[in-house]
Image: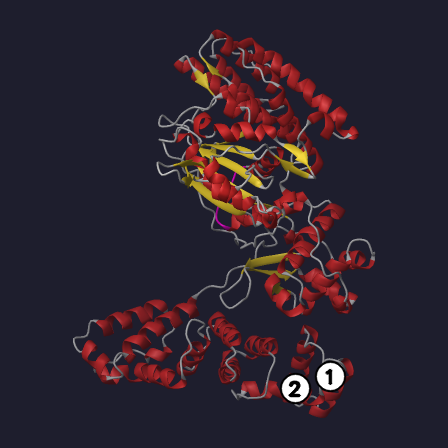
Amino acid sequence: MGKMTQELIVDLYIRGKAVHKEEISLKRATEEILNMYPDNIHESSAQFYLSLYSDLIKGKGSTWNQNSDLLIYYVRHIIEENGKSDGTKAYEGALKFAKAKSRKSLIASLEKLAAEFELSLNGRLSFEAWLNMLPEKKYSESTIYRYVRALEKAEEWLGVQFTKPILDVTGIEEFSDIDNHIKILPNYEEINQQHGHGDLSAALTLYKKYVEFLNQEEEAWWPSLDEYNPEISKEQWLELLKDGKTFTDNSYFAIAAMYDFGGTATCRQLEEKYGRTSDFYRASLGVQLASKIKNIFDLPYCVSEKDGNKVWPILFQGRNASGDEPGNFVWRLRPELFEALKEFGIERYLEEGEEEVPELSIKESMELIKEYIASKGFSYDGELIENFYLSLKSKPFVILAGTSGTGKTRLVRLFAEAIGANYKLVSVRPDWSDSSDLFGHVNLKGEFVPGAIIDYIHEAAKPENINIPYFLCLDEMNLARVEYYLSDFLSIIETRHREDGRVVTDEIILDKAASVTYGKVIFPENLYVIGTVNMDETTFPFSKKVLDRANTIEFSYVDLVPDFSEALEAAEAQNCKNDFLKTDYITLMSDTATEDRQFVSDICLELQEINEILQRAQAHIGYRVRDEIVFYMLNNKKEELLDTNLAFDNEIMQKILPRIQGSSASIKDMLCELFKKCAGDYTGLSQASVSEQMQVYVETKDCKYKKSAEKICYMMRRFEEDGFTSYSVSYTHLTLPTILRV
């Protein structure tokens, strides 16, 4: 027999109610059900479920194997249609079955249903059922009996009387008052030991958890219609289902599984029942299909202030999974889509579809990465995640700079987790003075002592690991002089070249004593070095040797106000291969495709204009910086992650402005001309300082490279106030609570 669908459940309930009211005979109702669902239910089962309505409103339990979804539907609708009296009996009848069969998930659902409708329950029965469903411990029937008896006899044993029996108490405060009263009684400890050596105290502890369970609120579905409504009708969904273009074999299968499950499920539940992986369902529906629908109807993103742009709400609403639901996040099909799937007959696609997980685009993968990071409770400004990715892909050496505690180190860890990469944190010591601290040295006995990273590099370079990204995070890397202890890396990374289809470097020269263990050591193509730095008086500034070889991403935005109003999607990590991050560009001339050459020329012309300004203060860039900026821009063009001007704005911030420091008049003139290049003219306030004029312009005018213009404004202000300026100006935007925003 096939699955008991929602439609079958509804029809059984309607006819079962009619049989109870004697509006139709059981025989006739059975015939109608069998004619409507010949492949879904046996005659004996149909008769049982048609009679179940009458049994439930009498509070009758049964050992006949029953469908949990059907029971919940019956009980809910009996409560809604008949009132709490019949509803309570129906609840108790269903609970007797759930307890007898140890249906923990069903018990939990029934308990929540009872709490929702505030039913007057048989306290003993409900508490017994709850004890049976506890996942952390399996209590025997004798133990449950002792605990229930202890609560029933507590008043008698202690010589007290409460306003109602303990097992009838369902309020948290009410039980807390009783519990506190019992615990301060002078004979409590003695009585507790006399009866089962602690049965009463154990029972009270468990009953407290039970009451808390009854009073927990079910998490609301997000987003509400007020927050986001795609406004796609059932008829429009039907057209998409029928056009043969919108849905792929994968998405037909995935959404058929979701519909067949009842329209509400986690990806893990679909995996367990229908096969394929959780990633298959997330990619097929929550990313690819949703993105396609967005483009067809030109829909906006569903924007979460904390979690960024989302597309899956076009198809679903969602909430965090409860403790008894496998998986992290629950999707629920929008009702218009569910009805369209029903009319379309989507079930026929369950035996079709491809086996492999759909390949995601880089943009789609980025959405999942951002969701994963947001699910861990971290919010990053704007397109910082995309910027971080593009920087890593352009060159496997990135510096994250900013105020302490802004999430720099956490970003590295979470990004690595999100893509399934290996991660190692190395805390830089102030006494590091050469590369031996990283790679190793020979002690007085002639033995090689490994440094902080050599084993990690060796592990990453193994053939079996070469397709797995390895993230090396150098935490607080400027506590020591970077150009000293990282000198070998800074030199070796410039030797990258292609060899037999891989990106390799020259050999790292180690002592002969190390060769026995490590052999020839190079920096493998799957190793990504990220340094985090705090710019304050306790750290060393970077030399141009360091700055030229890295994208320096500044963390200058902190939102201190948490948002508890939205469901927080507990996303799962991906399993990205190294191709996700591996660079496509090593040499500008040989690696640039013909169709990209005009784009590259335009970028180089823009850089040439900037370089002419930089030459005024001897801060101009060379070929290395030019190439890396171009590589960043090419990667962005290929993946379409950022607006072109925003991408170039990032590179001015990360590759050009960090080089600027000094106190000469030429520095000031250069900053003025750079500001004009990034923002425009700033004249008009003759009595104001230059930085004040710049600030007014940034706040009131459209700027081509806005972030760079803002940074130059801060650098100019420092020059005016201190007579000296540099990129490492410490400033942090603190976002006020929403209620205070103007």
Q: Residues within 10 Å of mark 2 (few under 14, many from 20)?
A: many
Residue shown at the point (74%, 59%) measured from the top left: 250
Disc 2 to disc 1, how far (Cα)? 9 Å
Percent position (x, y) of residue 258?
67, 64
Placement of 696 over or under 47, stated as above or below: above
Q: Amino acid at mark 2?
A: Leu
Would residue 183 appear left or right of 656 to someone viewing this image? left
Residue shown at the point (38%, 82%) measured from the top left: 144
Quarter of the N terminus within the rendering: bottom right
Residue 431 included in the magenta stretch of the image = no
Q: Main secondary structure of the magenta part?
A: loop
Say what secondary structure mark 1 lies in: helix
Percent position (x, y) of residue 690?
49, 13
443 and 372: which one is in front? Answer: 443
What is the image's colouring? secondary structure
25 and 415: which one is in front? Answer: 415
Q: What residue did someone put label 2 on?
A: 50
Percent position (x, y) of residue 714?
47, 21
Residue shown at the point (70%, 48%) measured from the top left: 291
Residues rendered magenta in the picture: 376-381
Mark 2 or mark 1: whose residue is earlier in sequence: 1
Q: Quadrant of residue 160?
A: bottom left
Q: Quadrant of residue 342?
A: bottom right
Placement of 455 over or under 65, stated as above or below: above
Q: Amino acid at mark 1?
A: Ile
Rendered image: mark on residue 716: none
Q: Residues within 10 Å of mark 1 (few under 14, many from 20)?
A: many
- State yes or no: discs 2 and 1 in contact (Cβ < 8 Å): yes
Q: What residue did someone put label 1 on?
A: 33
